[in-house]
Image (spheres, grey):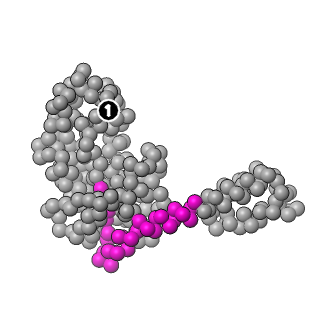
Amino acid sequence: MRETQKKTIAEISLEFERADEIHVEDLCRTYKEDSRVGVRKLVTKAIKKKDALRIEWERTKTLEIYERRYEHLGYVCGIDEVGRGPLAGPVVAGAVILPRDCRILYLNDSKQLSAAKREKLYDVIMNEAVSVGIGYRSPARIDEINILQATYEAMRDAVSKLNPQPQVLLNDAVTIPDILVQQVPLIKGDCRSVSIAAASIVAKVTRDRLMVKYDRMMPEYHLASNKGYGSAEHIEALKKYGPSPIHRRSFITHFC
């Protein structure tokens, strides 16, 4: 007790900040009898963080059920798309093979995550995945063959870029035509599978970054904020300026 009180609260706080999961438990035991309010708050905060981490691990394990079910067949890949509904920009598909001992936490449907969280997870996924494939189909192609067929093409493109190739595809609700890999469509798959969740994050971040670039070239459409979707300001800009080269002509007939 006396020994621990030789250290200032600032020094102890730094210890907690630098400690990994195992050493945090040791610190909690070391300082649990410290009478200083500041130290007790540090211990309480660390315990809550540890409990939250345990709950997240348990949640993540429940999202690996399909990966574990099919892993005996070989590589299991999650696939998802983003951008089927916008008035502008491409549709983007992501395909992700995660390692069997994947330790990435907080994976979820990209729509359930903040932009900052998606960006952080994108970097983690790109660093730790066995393989990532990204497929695009342009607004012109969407107009030519319709959004559903363009989405299928983007998905096939994403899968073709994987190395190694998967033996099983976990899809978010769809069955992709003209593909030989075994497919397992899952309703709300991006909330039920870590691989599909990872694919949804990769696709979302990839497309959002692209729309931000387009915004720099065509700021009048506010693409950085609306990402090509039909917000009021986007529709107003369409009426005022007409369509840009990245607008889907088949989607904007009511506005232009």
**Residue 68, horizontal then vertical, whole percent:** 38, 74
Residue identified by numbered label 1 = 231
Q: Is residue 127 left or right of residue 78?
A: right
Vertical position of residue 72 compared to residue 185: above or below: below
Locate the C terminus and report the quarter of the image it occupies: top left
Relative height, residue 232 to residue 120 (above, below): above
Q: Quadrant of residue 246?
A: top left
Q: Estimate how packed mark 1 is, as few (under 14), some (14 to 19) or many (20 or more) residues with alpha carbons within 10 Å.
A: some
Q: Quadrant of residue 72?
A: bottom left
Q: Residue at x 18, y 53 (%)?
A: 153
As for residue 64 lying within the magenta part, the answer is yes
In the image, taking residue 247 as reference, residue 98 lies left or right, namely right
Verify whether residue 110 appears in magenta.
no
95 or 149, nearer to the observer: 149
**In the rendered image of this protein, does residue 115 appear above or below residue 3?**
above
Task: Tell me if I can see residue 188 in this picture.
Answer: yes
Range shown magenta: 52-80
Q: Mark 1 belongs to which amino acid? A: Ser
Instruction: Label 1, secondary structure: give it.
Output: loop
Magenta span: predominant SS is: helix
In the current view of this chain or complex, which residue is farthest to the front?
A: 187
| Residue 22 image point, x, y percent | 64, 68
- On the rendered structure, is 38 left or right of 75? right
Q: Position of residue 240 (x, y in %)?
A: 24, 21
